[in-house]
Amino acid sequence: MKIHLCKVFLVTAILLFSTVTTSAQPTIYLVRHAEKLANWPEDDDLDAYQPLSVEGIARAQKLAEQFKPGTIAAVFSSRTTRSLHTALPLAQKLKLTLEVAEACADTAVIGAFYQTLAQRFAPDKAVVLVTHSNIIPYLLIKAGLAPACHQKMGIVASSSDSWLLIEGYEYFWQVKKWRTDAKTCEGFSRMKY
């Protein structure tokens, strides 16, 4: 009897977990921070504080124009100045508190962050993550993007290290279906703004 109850509990737990990871999930919009100020000191201690350039400030304002009030439930950013300043005009326009998410800077915590999003937001909600060129590919991959879709989504291999990257600042990504094992790009799109 105890073994049977354990099996029932295990099957129930698996079903609950799979429901959270595959169906009860908000739409995610991924955005690379806008253009950084050039001629910033090459110092690892100062990198996080690099501000936006004039072009970057204009792009942050343009990002804020992409979403109407009521369409986004939360705006997340990494802790860097450039990401915070990219996300802030959008959060202000939508009257949302800008939240810092470690997953916008650390690939090791993406899976746990996605679980938190699935628990916190209903499937009819959407969130925006403002992050970095070397984090967006991994956010897409952890959401289930198939390798065959990398080129279509603008993912390239870094020429100087082993990171995957996205190039440019003019796109954002929409993720509607997470954790899909599909061999297509269904649920993922890249849009110019």
Image (cartoon, helix red, strand yellow):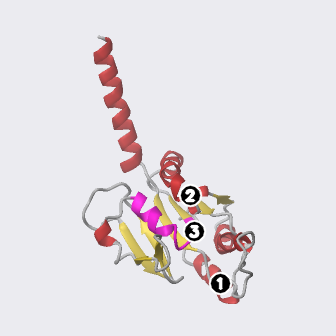
Label 1 crowding class (10 Å Cα cut-off): few <14, some 14-19, many 20+? many
Please identify the quarter of the rendering in which residue 141 is found.
bottom left
Tell me how far mark 3 sits from mark 2, CA to CA: 9 Å
Q: In this view, which residue lies farthest toward the front? A: 160
Stretch of the chain drawn in magenta: 129-143
Please name the residue that numbered disc 2 is placed on.
103
Residues under numbered marks 1 and 2 in contact, where contact means CB atoms less than 8 Å apart: no
Is the residue 116 above or below the residue 68 in the image?
above
- The residue under the point 41% across, 77% down is 156
Please name the residue that numbered disc 3 is placed on.
131
Between 191 and 69, the one nearer to me in the picture: 191
Please identify the quarter of the rendering in which residue 37 is found.
bottom right
Between 3 and 64, the one nearer to me in the picture: 3
Label 2 crowding class (10 Å Cα cut-off): few <14, some 14-19, many 20+? many
Report helix, strand or loop for mark 1: helix
Please identify the quarter of the rendering in which residue 91 is found.
bottom right
Magenta stretch: includes residue 107: no
Q: In this view, which residue lies farthest toward the top? A: 1
Residues under numbered marks 3 and 2 in contact, where contact means CB atoms less than 8 Å apart: no
Mark 1 or mark 2, earlier in chain: 1
- The residue under the point 38% across, 32% down is 13
Could you say where residue 160 lies in the image, as x and y percent from the top left?
50, 78
Question: Which disc number belongs to residue 162?
Answer: none
Please name the residue that numbered disc 1 is placed on.
56
Give left or right: position of 184 versus 62: left
Tell me how far mark 1 sits from mark 2, CA to CA: 22 Å
Tell me how far mark 3 sits from mark 1, CA to CA: 14 Å
Report the amino acid beneath label 3.
Thr
